[in-house]
Image: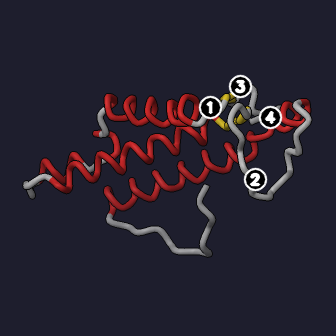
């Protein structure tokens, strides 16, 4: 999050500290909002997955329901509420959640690479579906 490091330093904290520390009640946590959303959705999907796979049904509908997009919004809401309540009410922490603004110039290069890679991936899917052609394999690329 652009500016988060500067904000942490303005609070008198070491933004580069990597040591594990005990977080005391009343502490303020500065949180990357996008990362938190990803974490909360992952927790919600895990609960959804467990609910679906524990049901006594083994049919096509069950497999379709396993897709992440079928995670109920009510479940995501419940997981999020519980998670944030634990941090704030149970543990007495103050949260400052930061999201990227519209001008993400520091991420523009990575966003461009991702856009190009996704275009190539969709081109590969199109070639496979229309012509049955698999893409040539090259050196492994890191996923991001």
Residue at 71% in and 36% down: 29
Location of mark 1 (residue) = 92
Any mark on residue 4, and which? 4
**Pointer 4: residues within 10 angstroms few (<14), some, or many (20+)?**
some
Q: x, y percentage for residue 95?
A: 66, 29
Q: Is residue 87 left or right of residue 54?
A: right
Location of mark 3 (residue) = 101
Frontmost of labels 4 and 1 is 1
Q: Sequence order check: which comes first, mark 4 or mark 1? A: 4
Q: Secondary structure at mark 4?
A: helix
Q: Are marks 4 and 1 in contact (CB under 8 Å)?
A: no
Q: Are marks 3 and 4 in contact (CB under 8 Å)?
A: no
Location of mark 2 (residue) = 21
Q: Are marks 2 and 4 in contact (CB under 8 Å)?
A: no
Q: Sequence order check: which comes first, mark 1 or mark 3? A: 1
Taking the view exactly as shown, the residue that stands out farthest to the top is 102
**Pointer 1: residues within 10 angstroms few (<14), some, or many (20+)?**
some
């Amino acid at each position: 999050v652009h500016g988060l490091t500067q904000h942490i330093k303005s609070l008198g904290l070491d933004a580069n500290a990597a040591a594990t520390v005990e977080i005391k009640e009343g502490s303020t946590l500065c949180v990357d909002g996008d990362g938190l959303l990803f974490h909360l959705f992952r927790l919600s999907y895990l609960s959804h997955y467990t609910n679906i796979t524990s049901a006594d049904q083994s049919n096509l509908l069950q497999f379709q329901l396993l897709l992440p997009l079928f995670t109920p919004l009510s479940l995501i809401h419940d997981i999020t509420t519980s998670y944030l309540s634990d941090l704030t009410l149970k543990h007495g922490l103050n949260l400052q959640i930061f999201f990227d603004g519209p001008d993400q110039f520091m991420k523009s290069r990575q966003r461009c690479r991702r856009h190009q890679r996704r275009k190539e991936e969709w081109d590969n899917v199109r070639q496979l579906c229309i012509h049955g052609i698999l893409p040539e394999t090259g050196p492994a690329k890191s996923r991001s």
